[in-house]
Image (cartoon, rainbow, N blue to C red):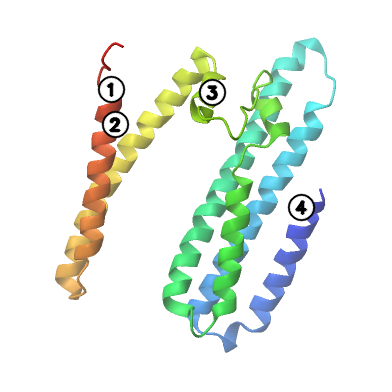
Amino acid sequence: MKLFVFYTGILIYGLYGLKASFNDRVMDENLLIAVNLSVILCLMLARLNINKAVRGSKIEVEIEKEDEHLAEMERKAYSAAIYIQVAFSLATIATLVGFILLRESQPKIVLVSFLLMAVSFFSLFPNENIIKITNPTFKMPHPKSKNYQQQYFDQFDDGEKYVMLKGLYKIYSLITWGLIILAFILMYYSVFSGNSQIMSIIGIGLLFMLVQVSFTQSLKPHKAD
């Protein structure tokens, strides 16, 4: 709850500062500040959902309503994860764009974006209280284990692995088509604007190749020992 109050205080202070000095800043600066505030809002909502899920998991309910109650707490836990992922994505974009546009004129704003990116990144790590809600039998492997990823994955049962597989395949399809569409958009942008995006297109092409090859390689049968 302390983090939620902390984020709320920063958000209110940031909104006040944005409104008070809005006309004194250029549009790029105001937009970056607005994105930073959006990141804080996402972190605040994530913390709110985490608090609700943790408190709710400790409430005793009737046996008939237990499954429904646990499902509701699990939805809140996953909602928190989504908010954190959105926060990390926005903070990363703000940091990169801010470094390009405002590193000399407003380095403090860029620094705030970087700090928010770091906070969001560390928030992505699994929370034991949340794991107990989404998967009560889950046991975190030792962080220094050589087979950490495999041990982590083996904690899930076949049903959970199937759900993960469906989700990952959807992501694979989304990324594949997204990269293709983005490459064509950059091509037309280069032609009509005169600003070459060749390096970006090459980078997208290499990433596209890596995604395709990695996915196909994962389906390839391994040789028997």
Seen at 58% across and 86% down, the residue is 23
Q: Residue under circle 3?
A: 151
Ranked by sequence position, the earlier of labels 1 and 4 is 4
Residue 12 in the figure: left or right of residue 213: right
Give the alpha-carbon distance from disc 4 to disc 3, as whole Å. 33 Å
Q: Residue under circle 2?
A: 215
Relative to residue 107, is residue 207 depicted above or below? above
Q: Residue 112: percent from the left, percent from the top? A: 61, 69
Tags 2 and 1 touching, CB below 8 Å? yes
Label 4 Cα crowd, 10 Å radius (few <14 / some 14-19 / many 20+): many
* SS for callout 1: helix
Q: Residue 209: percent from the left, percent from the top? A: 22, 43
Ranked by sequence position, the earlier of labels 1 and 3 is 3
Seen at 17% across and 63% down, the residue is 188
Q: Quadrant of the C terminus?
A: top left
Tags 2 and 3 touching, CB below 8 Å? no
* SS for callout 4: helix
What is the number of the mark on residue 219?
1
Tags 4 and 3 touching, CB below 8 Å? no
Give the alpha-carbon distance from disc 2 to disc 3, as whole Å. 21 Å
* SS for callout 3: helix
Q: Residue 31: percent from the left, percent from the top? A: 51, 72
Q: Amino acid at mark 3?
A: Gln
Q: Residue 79: percent from the left, percent from the top? A: 61, 39
Q: Residue under circle 4?
A: 4
Ranked by sequence position, the earlier of labels 2 and 3 is 3
Ranked by sequence position, the earlier of labels 4 and 2 is 4
